[in-house]
Amino acid sequence: MNTKAYYLPLQMKKLRLRELGNYGILPKLPAVGGNEGVGQVVAVGSSVTGVKPGDWVIPANAGLGTWRTEAVFSKESLIRVPNDIPLQSAATLGVNPCTAYRMLMDFEQLRPGDSVIQNASNSGVGQAVIQIAAALGLRTINVVRDRPDIQKLTDRLKKMGAEHVITEEELRKHEMKNFFKDVPRPRLALNCVGGKSSTELLRHLAPGGTMVTYGGMAKQPVIASVSLFIFKDVKLRGFWLSQWKKDHSPEQFQGLILTLCDLIRQGQLMAPICSELPLQDYQRALETAMQPFVSSKQILTMG
Ligand SMILES: NC(=O)c1ccc[n+]([C@@H]2O[C@H](COP(=O)([O-])OP(=O)(O)OC[C@H]3O[C@@H](n4cnc5c(N)ncnc54)[C@H](OP(=O)(O)O)[C@@H]3O)[C@@H](O)[C@H]2O)c1
């Protein structure tokens, strides 16, 4: 049974050109881009239940192709989201906050006061990690790339709930030993980058701790020293939301979405910083999204 959906804002994920060819799912070409976004249902087939015109919907899985004004989809390919949350939150809810939440919950049993370390902390996922961790009473050590306006970024992430914001360079310094006199060593590290950055995260992990890799922005392998395995028994794991969805029911995904909506309503989870552009400016949005140090999601809007 088909549902016709009119997509309002379409969130543009970075088109990771360099990743084409090695991502876990590749669309059959020609294809419509866009994995995220929120739309409004304008009509449903006569036997469709559970969604009605006016409802907000997001893609149930990656690869739906959200960069379009309207489309006809099966009910199963969409998930209903409450429409009492901000539109930008709905448009950016289905991937990054879900990933952040699952990584914080599924790998280590963390208690309030425990700390978590992550790199690319200003990414969409990173910003969600900061806010969800703060809501859970966890302390975050947030690693970012240095930039001319580092103080501005630090202030912004701290306002979201980040306890510490440090640069990749600072993380490599000897003084980090003193840092961990006041802050508990993290039992969980979240790696979006790979390469040297991930080696540094691992170096600061507590014995027996876990590093979860979910992104590879540096396009370099994760390298861990032999001693880390022998003397610290660290665990290296990976996370992919698409796989999580395959391993769980649509109801469990819906439950995750509703949990995140509660955090949004309580003011504990906001959308990442966003810049809105009309759909016809997609090329400008794409170019901006590919620049380093942007820290802002490019959102395509229409209607
Ligand atoms: N496994 C999963 O299920 C899953 C789910 C969601 C996202 N992801 C992946 O997670 C990553 C982030 O996604 P997002 O939407 O949160 O991204 P985003 O908001 O576009 O942010 C990208 C981040 O990567 C950083 N970065 C880029 N190149 C880098 C490099 N060479 N070294 C260090 N940092 C670098 C950027 O830092 P600057 O500000 O310094 O440029 C920024 O913090 C992507 O690879 C995405 O595919 C995976």
Image (cartoon, helix red, strand yellow):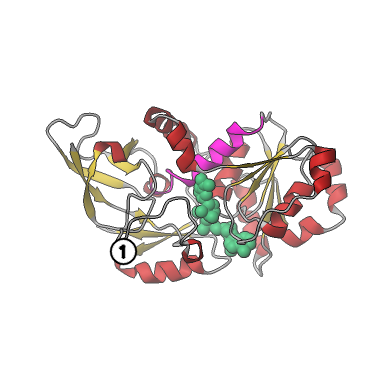
Quadrant for the C terminus in the image: bottom left
**What is the quadrant of residue 279 in the picture?**
bottom left
Q: What residue is at 42 percent from the left and 46 percent from the top? A: 89
Residue at image coords 66%, 57%: 221
Mark 1 = which residue?
279
Left or right, residue 76 beside residue 101: left
Residue 167 can be seen in this image:
no
> If the image is split into quadrants, where does the N terminus sit?
top left
Q: Is residue 130 above or below residue 67?
A: above
Where is residue 53? Give x, y as percent: 19, 39
Main secondary structure type of the part rendered in magenta: helix
- Vertical placement of 79 versus 280: above or below? above
- Residue 92 in view (yes/no): yes
Instruction: Please state the horizontal and vertical placement of residue 222, each as a whole percent of the image.
Output: 68, 53
Mark 1: which secondary structure? helix
Magenta residues, start to end? 91-108
Q: Ligand 1 is located in which of the four quadrants?
A: bottom right
Where is residue 195 drawn, in percent x and y?
68, 58
Mark 1 closeness class: few <14, some 14–19, many ≥20 residues within 10 Å:
many
Viewer-closest of 242 and 119? 242
88 on left or right of 135: left
**How many numbered discs sit on the rendered protein?**
1
Residue at position x 84%, y 45% from top? 227
Q: Is residue 69 within the magenta segment?
A: no
Amino acid type, callout 1:
Leu
Q: Position of residue 199 (x, y in %)?
A: 74, 53
